[in-house]
Image (tube, rainbow, N blue to C red):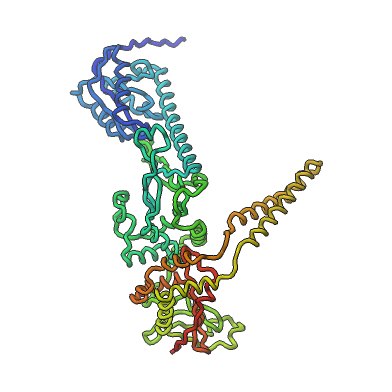
């Protein structure tokens, strides 16, 4: 028995039509131009058949992956299908791949047919016939082509942006990191964009905010956690990033520093001066897993390390060094390695106390050389070292008093007087001269020459290995030796590249370091615990209390950007006679 196929005669009379089109941000053209050519293409398609466009539905800024129900103009068009008073009987599109994506056509075409509305698609050459299997197959292929085209565009754009970052250090836009400003760097390198008036934008340091960033890194390395640093900045009235730039942080409340804000700064590698791109990536997920037709929504998530790219060279001024950033990241990973409980405990910062101990972590016992612990005795701040806390059998136990006590107020007053004298305008020249004289002759010539000799030796061995292989020696027997020689050569080359020309500082550098400490006299006069504690850290104070002599040896080493005045410890060494009671 054969199968009878009835021929379906399609009525080609068109009449009044509604136009639908779409323009997304990926088009790289203005919506007016996109609407013009799509509507013109649709008019040319239905014009010879007697069709005329009487209504217009055009979506702007909508991705083709978004279902029609979630598009503004698309949703209005679907709602208009139910209106018995509409003035059109069909819908025409300018380009099918712009309107349908994946299986979207198969989901909405039955709705048009249910209300007696025809669909005119240029790629079909006429009106869609729901009873024609070829039409269904072609529209399915069209949806797949649209999806493939979108994926290819995304891949090409991402590859181009990655190349611009890696090779040119190009700033790809987005929110400017706290501590930087975006400035004009001249015409855009793309001639077409330059002709249209586009300008190249680069990052430059916003010094007041950059100083806050440096302080955040320094506070973290001093042992303070994210929330502890945020609390400290809020207490001192430092303006938070969202309040500093409300125009690019409309989603924030600008209600002060948060632990997450500090964490974002500590984790941002762009502060090292290198352009970094792709740390956050768009992920499309189902809006409702139980309703696939609802489509996908876009969410930002941290990208995997293999998707992140970094420029080969520094692209903008650094705020923190690569070494400082790396040390912070290593500490954060070490804290997170113990699980959530360990991370929480380590991020709390120093334990809250009723009293601020100015010399916490600075004073050591001269007998056992352990750090002395802060304690409150009769409402006064003291530093103590008790023999009972020492390990049994320790050699220092023999001559260690049962308890060593040191009053804070007597020490602080003497140290402040000493610092005031060292950095007083009348004495600063003498201090700089002392620092210069204290610097040993520390040139890196010898270490550089040693590295060069090790590199030459490794290269000589590699040449001998190559000659042996050419003479017929089995290469597999020499793999380990070749790898070791290559590693030694690379290490020696890295040492040569990173060796400074000279470790000695000139007077201008030392004056700059002292200037960076700010108004030392005003800080000492103000005598606020936070300011004094910060000044002591920047001076890198170190104290050793000798109870038998009732004296303290105080050492200071001014540091700027984690670099201290080399050779200056002995030059600034002094002793103050203070009472321990």
From the top left corner, tell me how far across and down residue 195 is, in percent: 36, 33
**Residue closer to the observer: 223 or 109:** 223
From the top left corner, tell me how far across and down residue 113 is, in percent: 30, 22
**x 44%, y 50%: residue:** 316
Lateral position of residue 539 relative to residue 462, left or right? left
**Image position of 141 with respect to 348: above or below:** above
Lateral position of residue 477 relative to residue 165, left or right? right
From the top left corner, tell me how far across and down residue 377 is, in percent: 40, 85
**Image position of 34 with respect to 313: above or below:** above
**x 42%, y 20%: residue:** 138
From the top left corner, tell me how far across and down residue 3 is, in percent: 44, 11
Q: Is residue 343 visible?
A: yes
**Image position of 76 with respect to 270: above or below:** above
Count of labels shown?
Answer: 0
Quadrant in which residue 75 is drawn: top left
Quadrant in which residue 501 is drawn: bottom right
**Residue closer to the observer: 348 or 90:** 348
Q: Is residue 337 visible?
A: no
Lateral position of residue 328 relative to residue 258, left or right? right
Quarter of the image with the C terminus is bottom left
**Residue closer to the observer: 175 or 196:** 196
**x 55%, y 65%: residue:** 504
Lateral position of residue 439 relative to residue 271, left or right? right
**Image position of 377 with respect to 518: above or below:** below
**x 39%, y 32%: residue:** 192
Q: Residue furthest left?
A: 85
């Amino acid at each position: 028995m054969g199968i009878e196929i009835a021929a379906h005669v399609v009525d080609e009379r068109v009449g009044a039509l509604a136009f639908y089109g779409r323009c997304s941000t990926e088009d790289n053209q203005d919506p007016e131009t996109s609407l013009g050519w799509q509507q013109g293409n649709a008019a040319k398609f239905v014009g010879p058949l007697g069709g005329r466009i009487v209504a217009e539905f055009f979506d702007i800024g909508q991705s083709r992956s978004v279902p029609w129900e979630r598009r503004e103009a698309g949703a209005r068009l679907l709602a208009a299908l139910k209106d018995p008073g509409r003035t059109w009987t069909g819908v025409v599109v300018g380009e099918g791949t712009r309107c349908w994506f994946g299986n979207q056509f198969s989901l909405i075409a039955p709705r048009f047919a249910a209300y007696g509305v025809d669909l005119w698609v240029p790629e079909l050459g006429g009106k869609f016939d729901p009873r024609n299997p070829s039409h269904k197959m072609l529209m399915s292929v069209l949806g797949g082509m649209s999806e493939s085209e979108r994926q290819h565009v995304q891949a090409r754009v991402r590859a181009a942006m990655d190349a611009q970052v890696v090779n040119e250090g190009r700033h790809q836009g987005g929110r400017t990191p706290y501590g930087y400003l975006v400035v004009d760097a001249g015409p855009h390198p793309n001639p077409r964009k330059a002709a249209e008036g586009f300008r190249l934008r680069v990052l430059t340091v916003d010094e007041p905010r950059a100083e806050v960033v440096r302080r955040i890194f320094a506070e973290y390395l001093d042992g303070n956690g994210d929330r502890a640093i945020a609390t400290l900045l809020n207490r001192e009235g430092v303006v938070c990033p969202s309040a500093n730039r409300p125009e690019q942080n409309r989603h924030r409340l600008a209600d002060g520093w948060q632990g997450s804000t500090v964490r974002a700064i500590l984790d941002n590698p762009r502060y090292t001066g290198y352009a970094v791109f792709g740390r956050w990536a768009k992920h499309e997920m189902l809006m409702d897993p139980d309703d696939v037709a609802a489509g996908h929504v876009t969410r930002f998530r941290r990208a995997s390390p293999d998707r992140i790219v970094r420029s080969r060279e520094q692209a903008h001024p650094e705020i923190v060094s690569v070494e400082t950033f790396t040390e912070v990241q290593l500490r954060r990973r070490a804290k997170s390695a113990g699980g959530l409980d360990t991370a929480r405990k380590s991020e709390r910062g120093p334990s809250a106390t009723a009293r601020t101990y100015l010399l916490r972590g600075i004073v050591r016992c001269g007998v056992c050389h352990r750090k002395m612990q802060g304690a409150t005795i009769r409402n006064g701040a003291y530093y103590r070292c008790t023999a009972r806390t020492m390990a049994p059998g320790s050699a220092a136990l023999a001559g260690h008093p049962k308890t060593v006590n040191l009053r804070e107020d007597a020490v602080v007053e003497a140290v402040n007087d000493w610092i005031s004298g060292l950095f007083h305008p009348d004495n600063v020249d003498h201090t700089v001269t002392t620092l210069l004289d204290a610097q040993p002759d520390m040139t890196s010539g010898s270490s550089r020459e040693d590295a060069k000799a090790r590199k030459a030796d490794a290269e000589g061995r590699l040449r001998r290995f190559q000659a042996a292989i050419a003479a017929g020696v089995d290469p597999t027997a020499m793999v380990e030796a070749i790898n070791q020689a290559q590693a030694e050569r690379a290490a020696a080359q890295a040492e040569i590249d990173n060796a400074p020309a000279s470790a000695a500082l000139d007077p201008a550098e030392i004056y700059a370091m002292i200037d960076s400490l700010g108004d030392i006299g005003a800080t000492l006069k103000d005598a606020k615990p936070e300011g004094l504690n910060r000044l002591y850290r920047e001076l890198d104070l170190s104290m050793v209390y000798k109870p038998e002599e009732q004296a303290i040896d105080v050492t200071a080493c001014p540091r700027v950007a984690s670099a201290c005045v080399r050779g200056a410890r002995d030059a600034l060494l002094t002793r103050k006679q203070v009472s321990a009671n």
